[in-house]
Image (cartoon, rainbow, N blue to C red):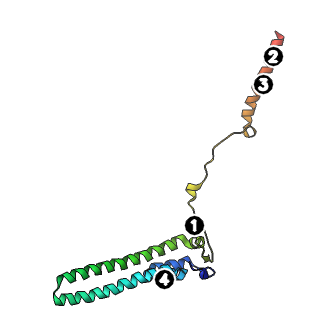
Amino acid sequence: MNPSNQNTVKSSVAAGLLGIFLGQFGAHDWYLGDKKKGIIHLAIFGGSFILIILTSVMLAIASLADVSIISIFFGFLAVIAYLAMVGNGIWGFVEGVILLVQGDAGLAAKGYAVAFPTAPAANTATTQPTTTATTTPESKPEETKAEEAKPEESKTETKSEKSDK
């Protein structure tokens, strides 16, 4: 993250959409001020594009000259260039989706200035605390208190009965 861009307000929606549609070029990284990742995206795209053009030209020349070994080599090179380009596009797309899912709270957690950082909604059904009934001497029901008092009365009666005998 570039310190000069920390004071500018960023939007996760804008960054996410840039990542989804232009992630192959690193547009979302440039928007967020991460120039290093933006350069990596551009280098992968540019290198793959140039390699695809060169292999296409070399395959055309090799087919005219009827050289099969060179055709196989440049065909293999073209497949690698296509895979690199597709992988770069998937990488940018996934980063865009992650930015959208995390929202402004995710950008705020990374140190970006955002307009309205809100935390993602938590599932309240699984986070509700369970309560267990515990009784303390102060919180006992009246019936329990009355039952505890009865044995004391019976003890008194037994003493009086003994004195009668």
What residue did someone put label 2 on? Answer: 159
Q: Earlier in the sequence, mark 2 or mark 4?
A: 4
Residue type, numbered disc 2: Lys
Mark 4 is surrounded, within 10 Å at the Cα level, by few (under 14), some (14 to 19) or many (20 or more) other residues, namely many
Q: Residue 120 got which mark?
A: 1
Q: CA distance from mark 4 to mark 1?
A: 25 Å
Residue type, numbered disc 3: Glu
What residue did someone put label 4 on? Answer: 27
Q: Nearer the viewer, residue 137 or 140?
A: 137
* The quarter of the displayed image where residue 135 is located: top right
Residue type, numbered disc 1: Pro
Mark 4 vs mark 3: give the one in front.
Answer: 4
Residue 36 visible, this orientation: yes
The residue at 55%/55% (across/down) is 126
Residue type, numbered disc 4: Ala
Q: Are marks 4 and 1 in contact (CB under 8 Å)?
A: no
